[in-house]
Image (cartoon, rainbow, N blue to C red):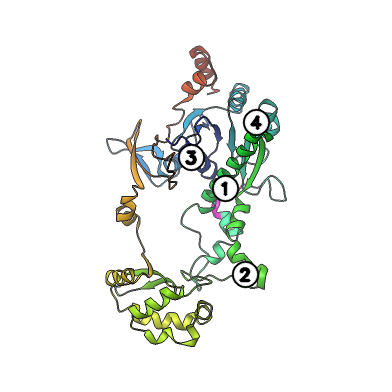
Amino acid sequence: MSQSLAGLRVLEMGRIVSAPWSGQTLGDLGADVIKIERPGVGDDMRSYGPSYAVDADGRETPESGHYLCSNRNKRSVTVDITTAQGQEIIRKLAAESDVLIENYKVGDLARYGLDYDSLAKINPQLVYCSITGFGQSGPYAKRPGYDAAFQGMSGMMAVTGEPDGGPQRVGVFIIDEMTGLYATVAILAALRHRDAGGGGQYIDLALLDVGVAAMAPRTIEWTLQGKIPERLGTKSPGSCPAQVFKCADGYLNIQAGAEVHYRKLCDALGLEELKEDPRFAVRKDRVLHQDLLVSLLEEKIKQRGTRELFDDLVARGVVVAPIYQANEVVEDPQVRHRELFFEVPHPTVGKVPLVKSPMRLSKTPVDTFSAPPTIGQHTRQVLTQVLGYSDEQVQSLADSGAI
């Protein structure tokens, strides 16, 4: 495990994607992440299908793929925060932690005395990050929300899909994941401020805010010029040719909007005359006459085989990429060289496949990973080692249902 954040303790009261994504990122960087889960239920994503890990006998386990991919490098502790004993455990853990991440609905944790104002009295150095759908204030603050809702509200769905089709969602929880990354950046900034003597602070992160921020390059079409951004399929709003093209036996993603790449593409397709056509002289002109240019390129591209054209364009230095299915991603030579897919030992499944962190640090490499924990796997360990509870106290808490 990376030593970048060694000695930092994170209390993650997170479920679904955004808060766990941030917790996992901090865990990858070496923080001790203690994940708080509901006894008997756990993180909602544990049961989010359709893919589940299977045991040695080929039977599905309660460990869903969605849970596994965002919860490595953590310790799981089950606590019933609706009980007085459970609340006391959280307070004691907060007192021993540097960071708390939560994504409960606005006001939920305040009902149990676990909000920032309450815990800051116990630990003034605590960095407390709240992730919600709409933020802590405003007319929608108390509404629940999920990633797809914010893809719609941010304008992302409106510009995703084919021009003559309906709005589409991105195929992953993209706003959740970006929110988790924004949370990590904000937490690290707050920790630097704290370590400079400024004390802890509160972070208010909203999925809607993140979605709107991510859409800035398209929304500015309206705020700058009063133009409603359109769905363009795989085309780029500001570059051409830059899209997926159909070949004789498949598809290629060709990004030849830059002048040097455009001219090389024309040479590869035997369309040298287009290099001097004033309608396509520079990128701005090509975007203006995009429909005509694309039709001329398509006529040639559809006559070429995918592999043959790909190799030709790569040799010429044109930016081109295949359109992979998941199995092809795993087998790609560059992906394999970067060792992005790997397996970690798991206490009940044997081994689980994960995707390595993309962060490559030269002095504190992110290269050691522990499996996503089973529900409550570390409850006794954390209570005895971190909080100093005796085995008898832990058993009493278990008997009462607090853990």
Q: Identify the residue at horizontal 53%, vertical 22% (top origin).
A: 401
Give left or right: position of 396 versus 208: left
The residue that mark 1 highlights is 182
The residue that mark 3 highlights is 24
Residues at badges 4 and 2 in contact (C-beta under 8 Å)? no
Q: Which mark is residue 221?
A: 2
* Label 4 environment density (alpha carbons within 10 Å; few <14, some 14–19, many ≥20): many
Residues at badges 4 and 3 in contact (C-beta under 8 Å)? no
- Between disc 4 and disc 1, the foreground one is 4
Part of the protein shown in magenta: 143-148
Residues at badges 4 and 1 in contact (C-beta under 8 Å)? no
Tell me how far mark 4 sits from mark 3, CA to CA.
Answer: 22 Å
Tell me how far mark 1 sits from mark 2, CA to CA.
Answer: 24 Å
Q: Identify the residue at horizontal 42%, vertical 85% (top origin).
A: 274
SS type, badge 1: helix
Q: Does label 1 or label 2 sit earlier along the sequence?
A: 1
Q: Identify the residue at horizontal 56%, vertical 57% (top origin).
A: 151
Give left or right: position of 309 versus 98: left
- Between disc 4 and disc 3, the foreground one is 4
- With respect to residue 96, does 362 lie above or below? below
Residue type marked 4: Gln
SS type, badge 2: helix
* Label 1 environment density (alpha carbons within 10 Å; few <14, some 14–19, many ≥20): some
The secondary structure that most of the magenta stretch takes on is: loop
- Residue 145 placed where, x, y %? 60, 49
Tell me how far mark 4 sits from mark 1, CA to CA.
Answer: 21 Å
Q: Does any portion of residue 113 appear in the rendered image? A: no
